[in-house]
Amino acid sequence: MSTIISQLQLPGKQAPKLNALPPLSLYIHIPWCLKKCPYCDFNSHAVRTGIDIDEKAYVSALIRDLESTLPHVWGRRLISIFFGGGTPSLFSAATIDTLLTAIKTLFPLEPGAEVTLEANPGTFEAEKFAAYRDAGINRLSIGIQSFNSDHLRSLGRSHDGQDAIKAIEIAQKNFDNINLDLMYALPGQNINDAGNDIKTACAFGVSHLSVYHLTLEPNTLFYRFPPVLPSDEQSAAMQEMIEQTLTSHQYLHYETSAFSQRGRVAQHNMNYWLFGDYLGIGAGAHSKISFETQIMRQMRYKQPQEYIEKAALAGAGSETTVQSRQTLSNNDRCFEFMMNALRLTGGFESALFQERTGLPISIVMPQLDEAEQRCLITRDHRHIRPTHLGKRFLNDLLQLFLSDSLEYSPKSTGNGKA
Ligand code: SF4
């Protein structure tokens, strides 16, 4: 591989400039779960027995945090809102209502903006679905993972196959825009089991499916004590079968793990993948905010209690909840744009690169040439798309755009399951 990007400079060393700011989304992180799943590396904390979550204190912290960050995004409209976690459905509908009311007071919302809440399929959560809809949620994302109770047990999940089915039925009575999260290559799973999960999901005809390969992430129990998993060949066969089954059920495979019915792509996630802006509030949430001459990343304090304490000190523009911030270099802009946009099976319009990074596409021409020579992308005068090979070997494709000053991380936003 010859073309690792060295420090990119614009002619005359001028700073890159954005002609217009990208669309803005809001992410709200709820960092608690009933228990910690052994494969999970998200910023989620098991609720300790006998200790209730202080919803009130956390909501006050979120609202203070949002108010303090307003000067950075003044006057901008939100195109989507996403409550992720953790398990946001542990919170009451009244709490979600309070938050949405505060958000709408502080931000103008695009008409028809997508407002998603992640929910687990336990009975306790499903009973609240109607109330979430009344609070203003218009899209539900349910963490089904599998319909097979044995596999759910092996994943350490609190629900079983029947709970999963019941939760989808209740969700469909209240929402017409539903995502189901599923996983494959599970301990003890064979291709028939994976096929049964996908066919069961298809039978519900929900608008969106996100299907993830189980991976063993560092800092998880599964990483320390790995279960026996299907081989790489078996996993690849499952992936092929899943893509074919979903295509035959008219789902559009539009991103590495995302499948949607016509017109139902996830607006919030699309904004991540098209290198839009997002403001992330809540413990450990990540933000990416663009200004005319800089693009800034931030991460909030990760421990919920510390986050609440820091938020209590916040004032307009002071952002005491921010633990780390970074201004993106030209290299970062290039790599992060590609890391997101090349996940889209349809690729992106070449003009978008300059629109979102402020850099001319000519700056990555040697890398694009090499990617094309290696049959990892195709391009014409308007579009750049990953090929079938490029999608299969996405990491190899992205390595071409990796600067020697960056550490590669396949997670695009840091905010949950995008
Ligand atoms: S996988 Fe989901 S439910 Fe399990 S611990 Fe992680 S965030 Fe919580």
Image: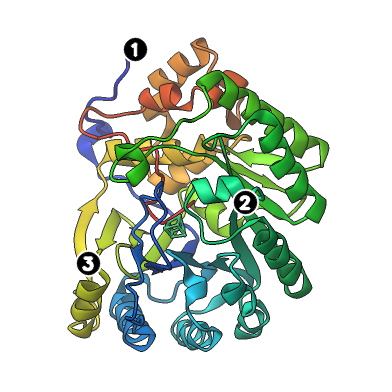
Q: Nearer the viewer, residue 340 or 131?
A: 131
Cα distance between the residues tagged 3 and 1: 37 Å
Residue indicated by mark 3:
322
Q: In the image, what residue type sits under mark 2?
A: Ser
Residue at numbered disc 2: 149
251 sits to left or right of 95: right
- Residue 29 lies in quadrant: bottom left
Nearest the eye: 15 or 271: 271
Please, what secondary structure does the residue beneath circle 2 have? helix
Picture disc at residue 381: none
Could you tell me which residue is drawn at 75 percent across and 56 percent down?
A: 206
Q: Position of residue 418 (x, y in %)?
A: 49, 51
Q: How packed is label 1: few (under 14 Cα within 10 Å), some, or many (20 or more)?
A: few
Disc with the residue nearer the chain's start (3 vs 2): 2
Mark positioned earlier in the residue sequence (3 or 1):
1
Q: Nearer the viewer, residue 149 or 393?
A: 149
- What kind of residue is marked 1? Met
Q: Is residue 363 left or right of residue 183?
A: left
Q: Is residue 1 above or below residue 325?
A: above
Q: Quadrant of ligand 1?
A: bottom left
Look at the numbered discs 3 and 1 and tell me whether their residues touch, using CB distance below 8 Å. no
On the image, the x and y values in percent for residue 238 come to 64, 29
